[in-house]
Every structure is written in C-alpha cells, then in structure tokens.
Image (cartoon, grey):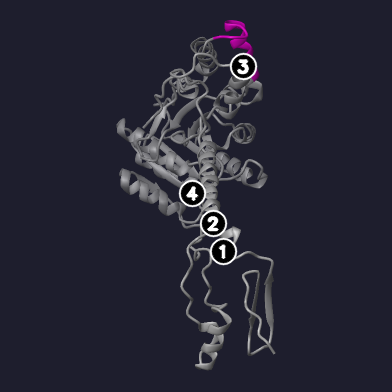
Amino acid sequence: MARRSISPSRVSCNNPEDGESTETQGRPSGRPIISWIFLFPLPPAGAILPHHGGTESDLSASITAGGNKNSLAPATAKHPTFASIIIYALCLAMVGRLFKRLRKLGRTPPVLASGTETYIDPETLETRLLLADVGVTVTAELLAATHRITGRSGTSADIAGALRDKLIAILKPVERPLEIDPGAHPYVILMVGVNGSGKTTTTAKLTRRLSAQGRQVVLAAGDTFRAAAVEQLQQWGRRLGVTVIAQQSGADAAAVAFDAWQAAHARGSEILIIDTAGRLHTQDHLLAELAKMRRVIARQDPAAPHEVLLVLDATIGQNALLQARRFTDEIGVTGLAITKLDGSAKGGVLVAIARELALPIRFVGIGENSEDLEPFVAQDYANALLGIETTLTP
C-alpha cells in the first residue's frame, strides 16, 4: 500500500506499542497562537518537531537503521515566514501596551497637578478625589465648597487653594499630637487594629520616638496568636534597648497585659505600650477579647489604658472608615495612626474619618524604618493629598 506523505495540515503520530493515533487537522504550521501571547521560546515557523519526525522517507530510514520514531533528531529549521514576523511584532506591541496600562493602574494620580494643568473640569476633579479614597459624601462636600468659591469653571491654582482651605478646615480639629500624662505611672498605650495594618512595626516606631525623648518605655507582647509575633517584638526590643514582657505563644493576652503593667509599675517606667493581635472588625469574639484586656488593665489603674491607638492601613480605602467605627464602638478608640503612606495610596479616607468621627490623628507612617513615624500635620497632609507639594516623604 502506498504511504501517505505528511503534510503541514495533517500530522499523524502512531505509537507502535499501544497502536493509538492522534491527529491534528486544519492547523497551519508554525507557532501556536498561545506561544505568541506568552512569548515561549518555541522553534521558528517551519521547524520539524522531534516527536513528529521529518519526512516519511526520513522516518523509514531511521526505523530501518534501528532507530525510534520518538527519538529522531530534528531536521534543519526553516526561516520564519513574513506572516510569522508580523504576528510576532503585533503581539509584542499588544503586550507592551498592556503592561503600560497596568503600571498606570498601580499608581494613584495626584488630585491636582498644579505644575502642568491650568484648568480642571469638575468631573475630572470628582474622579480624582474618589480615587484618593476621600469618599462620596466628603467629595460632594468638597466640590460644593469649591464651586461656591471659584464658580463652575476655574483655574487649577484657584481650585487648589479652595480645596486646600476646605481640607485644612476639616483636618485641623483632629490634628492633636499624643501627649503623655506625667501623673500616670505608667502611661498605658493599647495598640489595636486589623491583621496586617502594621501594629507591631508602629509599636516599634513609637517606642523609638518616645525613647529618643528620654522616656523609659516597656513593651508588652500581647499578640500571642500570630506565629512569631512575640519573637518579632522581642527583636525590636533588643534593637531599641527596651524591656519586653512576654509569655509563651497561645497564652492569655489579658494575663500578658496584667504582668506587663505590674512590671512597668514596679520599675517606675513612664510608658507601657501593649501590642495586640490583629483582628477583623467583623469578629465579635475577638473584639470581646480586647474589651477583656481593657477591663484587666482598668483594675490596676481606673484611668488606663490612657490611649487606645487604632492603626489603619492607608491602602484599604473606605474600609478604614468601617474599622474606625467598629473599634470606636467596641473599645473606645482615642487616637489614630495611619500607615503605608510611602506608596501610591493617598489615604484620603482620613478626611472622611475626621468629618464623621472626629478622632484625633496622632501619627502617619511614611516608611519601613524605625524613624519613619511623624506627627500628623493637617496642612502638610492636605498638600500631599492634592499633589501641591509632597512634604510627607521619608
């Protein structure tokens, strides 16, 4: 029987052991389209794959010589066709445009680019305020105030001045730095927040800042749930030269707080900072544990804890407002610290929190180093949010 020649549009591979056959019909030779998308380094168009062998005569010659069809060496590859080169160039261009768009999406633009814009329409301004996580309600209020001052149309400089004045008016009342009561022995600061907000790192930064002022600080490793949380705080304690009161992992956090207060009081320390485990604002039983810690501390000093500092992540947007509401209702937050402002996040949710809850904003985190914790300043924050000038930089 005459043998068929293997054509590019019909490839047959027979396995002599199981007799099965797989065929691919109607597929043009060259690279599969998926290889162009992911840029796999496949052979150029026209190359003969080792598994399929070469021509029929090559296959017969190899078998006669005692070879195996599945181990044939590939034949010499042909040059890529003009169509393959065009497809490759188009796919490269498409992938380049895709990554360029993704890089733009990863950056939150400033609300106002005063150096390049002479005019900004209200719709664009509204979009930029929302992207900065200011919130719908506060955005509407800011736009109304801007419209009253500058009218429907105005230059970027006019709008910048109106927005800055309005933001400072909202934020100035909550610009209240942390003040240590000298009559408290010790002054107790309870650090709270959700998982991953940066409580332990903020605890270390605050410890460094207070120690630099000549104050004696004691740390309590109240996060007995997260793996290696106690070891992390102990490492910070060794680095900063402060005492860390801790128990084994899984211990009762309220017991750790009790022991820490007793130790700080006996040593005459000025400040006790208690780190706690991260918990979501939707977990009632975990919030109840925080309330228990507060009750245990209050038995030693009715005024303690003197400060309940809620640590918020600037990258989570309006969810930070929900967290501030719930933690305030459950344990009585007395101050805020917002972290991760060194990235693309603008942290505009602080404006919404200041408008609704009027919680004092104590600190802003602008980096990962121990010195990257600064007191909140309303004017600097408003300038950084609007992109007028960036003063909140490490």
Closest to the camera, between mark 3 and mark 4, is 3
Residue under label 1, please give it. 30
Give the amino acid type for the residue marked by disc 1 in the picture.
Answer: Gly
- Secondary structure beneath disc 1? loop
Residue 194, numbered label: none
Residue at x 57%, y 77% (from the top left corner): 52
- How far apart are the alpha carbons under marks 2 and 1? 8 Å
Side (left or right) of 371 relative to 283: left
Q: x%, y% of residue 126? A: 61, 21
Residue under label 4, please give it. 256
Closest to the camera, between mark 2 and mark 4, is 2
Give the amino acid type for the residue marked by disc 3 in the picture.
Answer: Pro
Give the amino acid type for the residue marked by disc 4 in the picture.
Answer: Val
Figure quadrant of residue 295 = top right
Q: Between 313 and 243, which is closer to the camera in this rendering?
A: 313
Q: Assess whether mark 4 and mark 3 are in contact (beta carbons under 8 angstroms).
A: no
- How far apart are the alpha carbons under marks 2 and 4? 68 Å
Residue at x 58%, y 6% (from the top left corner): 149
Q: Between 346 and 10, which is closer to the camera in this rendering?
A: 10
Write the start and end of the magenta stretch as one range.
140-154
Q: Please state, as top left, top right, bottom left or bottom right, where the C terminus lies in the image.
A: top left
Closest to the camera, between mark 1 and mark 3, is 1
- Secondary structure beneath disc 3? helix
Residue under label 3, please give it. 122
